[in-house]
Amino acid sequence: MFESLSSRFTSAFSSLRSRGKLSNADIENTCAEIRQALLESDVALSVVENFVAQIREQSLAVLPTLQSGSNQGQAIFNIVNAALIEILGGSARRIRFAKNPPTVIMLAGLQGAGKTTLAGKLAKFYADQGNTPLLVASDLQRPNAVTQLQIVGESIGVPVFAPEPGNGVGDPVKVAKSGIDFAKSKLYNMVIVDTAGRLGIDDDLMKQAISIRDAVNPDEILFVVDAMIGQDAVRTSQAFLDGVGFDGVVLTKLDGDARGGAALSIASITKRPIMFASTGEKIGDFDIFYPDRMASRILGMGDVATLAEQAKKAFDGESSAKLEAKFASGEDFTLEDFLEQLQAMSKMGSMSKILGMLPGAGAMKKQIENFDESEIVRTKAIVQSMTPTERRDPKVLNGSRRARIALGSGRKVSDVNNLVDRFSAAQKMMKQVRNGAMPAGMGAMGLPTMPKGPAKAVVHKKKSKSGNPAKRAIEDGQ
Amino acid sequence: MSLFSKFIAKVRGTNDFSAADWHELEEELLLSDLGPTLTKTVLEQARKIKSENANEALSHILTSTLSSKDRSMLLGETTTVIMVVGVNGTGKTTSVAKLAANIKKSGKSVVMAAGDTFRAAAVEQLQTWGSQIGVEVVAGKTNGDPASVAFDATKRAKELNSDFLIIDTAGRLHNKNDLMAELEKVKRVVEKVFPINETLLVIDATTGQNGLQQAKIFTEAVQTTGIILTKLDGSARGGVALAIENEVDIPIKWIGTGESVNDFAPFEPTNYIQGLLS
């Protein structure tokens, strides 16, 4: 997500940084570039104009105070970063739990924004934290919305209150109201009310949403909005704000390549925080929205915090502790460990998703998009075709063993050779690290619980070897 | 005086069109989701207008950005096969049902294939529509292979000698390569029996510039032949469709304007352009 916006920002700032002293004209140029980039990313026009005006004013004000010789481009960059975080809503906010349960959450939004799917994700998210949510099917409009919610509820093990069949039959207000009573009597501590999708300008349906709101008196009303929405974000979010009103925003379909302009527009116009982001089709593809992380991603600074968190989840404590102990005791990092790391990496998601979170990802967008995910599968196949002895000690790999491995993994002998060569290089590098010589560029990764060597080894592997001996020497020396 | 009549008065030389007015015109076009690139092109052309009939000239500029391709339905020799594709939540299933109802009304026979085996209750949603409009639905198992459902439906359409077959597909984001490959498979499998005559991409009128990307990638994968522009009854004007026609050269063929089965009509360029300017 946001790649395109971030690559535009990256290019705007790299030209700014390359200058020593900035003039007012430089600021004007940067502002024009930011304006174009934001418009292409579907940020609402009024928000763009305000944002650019604010950047221009602050930059021009700060420019005379900057000492020549200091990095002036960086100072401007900091202004933009701060402004972005401010628009996106400062720090992340969580759901406010009611003093007297159940906590009632009502969902509202346009048709097709993803409310029903989101209801399930939200329920799962809170059920995993030990809450007892109840889903209430108040979308009686769309054909089979009730069935959809029931199926979602069943798959995540969350009960669904659905007394009416839907498809135009039944009173959604009554369903919502009795859903709350049901939750109270059965001691559920959270109720999530799914409602029918409606257009911002449809008065009748907006009135119905208001009636539901008044009947259930929700603790949080969440406005669910598609990240791909265009300039209409302004009218629609304003209409919902004036109509039923809302306390927070949930962005859906953020796993697409939408440039995320909607996030900026809605947060800026409604002054309501974006609380959650939905990032995939699976029920677990859902997370709290972090404005600072999003700002740094838009600006091409990467999202190392999220990456570290995902790494923590994927690399289970035991195996990384084992690896760390091994590493510290001076034992060699073997292909067996490497295989384990590869498997953990694939648990973290696709390589392009991981790489996309690294700083500077905007600039290498093309390479990331073209990254061949099956390369990891192939590498795994080669290692898996080795015997335990071979994995522990690659030195025993003679010609006939290599031919057998190639046959077993369906790769060429040269692929096996390549892997073994690069692995030996990585192993050598690990020894250097242990002896205190940190290879360049590795310290910056700083991922907790992820042993640094293997991650680097995987990245290292992706490079093809140069045929030029001189070049190869440089590559190997890295 | 409205912005456009002001603009027209300027062209006639009876009024000044100030820099602020130009800015306002730019704003209007941007707010319609035309995108910064197309907006710039349109403005440049508008500055050159010298014709007496300025209203016509301005809508001529916008009309000229439309695709010149034929907007009528592409028909097959025996059974016309239409596949409906798009990202999640644009209204594919509803559009399939509306299109089927429209075809049935014209006296032709039609079969629908419930190819969205992924989203919970999508199959039931199409079946509910099917019984409402009296059209047969071929369905498989939830989470089954969409290609196999499509194939069964194709065989059924052949058996019934049906005039039309409309295949619903699961919503997919265009940047998910595996899901796009799945769509290509559906197409391959169906084409073992009948060629697919129309591949219609459903675009939500509220979509912004991302719609362009959707059109490009879906066209690359499954050769989109037309667009269904949905949710035009809202406050969005669907200007991104103009950007798509201009850049990717795919004609809009149908529009969806509401929840009822009759809120569906062939695309009318003149009305659409007027809607953008309103």
Image: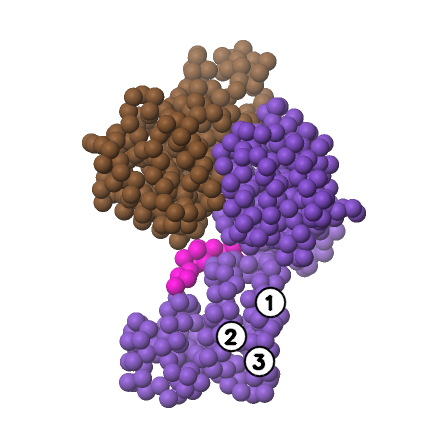
Chain colours: A purple, B brown
From the viewer's side, name the closer residue of A389 and B4: A389
Q: Of marks 1 and 3, which one's residue comes earlier in the chain?
A: 1
The disc placed on residue B48 is none
Graded by Cα atoms within 10 Å as few (under 14), some (14 to 19) or many (20 or more), the crowding at tag 3 reads few
Asked if residue A115 is positioned above or below residue B64 in the image, the reply reads below
Taken as a whole, is the magenta stretch helix, strand or loop?
A: loop
Q: Is residue B9 visible?
A: yes
Judging from the image, mark 2 belongs to the subunit labelled A
Residue B87, image quadrant? top left
Tell me the SS state at disc 3: helix
Q: CA distance from mark 1 to mark 3?
A: 15 Å
Residue found 60% across the figure and 52% down from its top: A124
Magenta residue span: A359-374
In the picture, measured across the screen, residue B242 lies left or right of residue A88, that is left
Q: Looking at the image, is mark 2 or mark 3 nearer the viewer?
A: 3
For disc 3, the marked residue is A322
Task: Answer yes or no: are tags 2 and 1 on the same subunit.
Answer: yes
Asked whether disc 2 touches disc 1, contact meaning CB atoms under 8 Å apart, the reply is: no
The quadrant where residue B94 appears:
top left
Separation of residues labelled 2 and 3 (CA atoms): 14 Å
Q: Position of residue A338 (x, y in %)?
A: 47, 76
Same-chain check, marks 2 and 3 = yes
Which numbered marker is on residue A312? 1
Considering only vertical position in the picture, is B58 above or below A263?
above
Q: Secondary structure at mark 2?
A: helix
